[in-house]
Amino acid sequence: MSFSEDFGSAFDQVASPMSKLRQLDGLKRAITESGLTHYAIGKSAGVSPGIIDRFMRGERDLQLATASKFAIALGLQLTATSARSSSG
């Protein structure tokens, strides 16, 4: 198991669904605003442009490892936030 798979599992356990949704919406916006083709992003990220196409159309979700690859290709960084309340 790779570091990104380990981190992805940990992220999925602590991040709230709304936090994930905001991250993915932000990633979609960044892809659109980048001006790059899905082919160029996919090539840089090492994934099929078809995955980007389906993600952008809302036909598929992304695993954290894939979302992270897209973010890196766009010069961005994903951040995790806890689903736990800080007002404990």
Image (cartoon, rainbow, N blue to C red):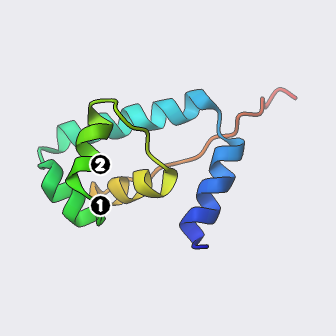
Q: Residue at x 23, y 65 (%)?
A: 44
Q: Secondary structure at mark 2?
A: helix
Q: Residue at x 41, y 55 (%)?
A: 66
Above or below, comparing residue 82 to residue 46 in the picture: above
The answer to whether residue 67 is left or right of residue 47 is: right
Question: Amino acid under label 2?
Answer: Ile
Question: Amino acid under label 1?
Answer: Val
How far is mark 2 from mark 1, CA to CA?
A: 7 Å
Q: Which residue is mark 2?
A: 51
Q: Residue at x 71, y 43 (%)?
A: 14
The answer to whether residue 18 is left or right of residue 51 is: right
Q: Residue at x 58, y 71 (%)?
A: 3
Residue sticking out furthest to the bottom? 2
**Occupied quadrant, residue 75:** bottom left
Q: Position of residue 62 (x, y in %)?
A: 44, 45
Please rate how many residues cluster around mark 1, counting C-alpha atoms within 10 Å: few if below 14, some from 14 to 19, many from 20: some
Q: Which residue is mark 1?
A: 47
Above or below, comparing residue 36 to residue 16 in the picture: below
The answer to whether residue 78 is left or right of residue 85 is: left
The disc placed on residue 86 is none
**Occupied quadrant, residue 7:** bottom right
Q: Which image quadrant: the C terminus?
A: top right
**Occupied quadrant, residue 4:** bottom right
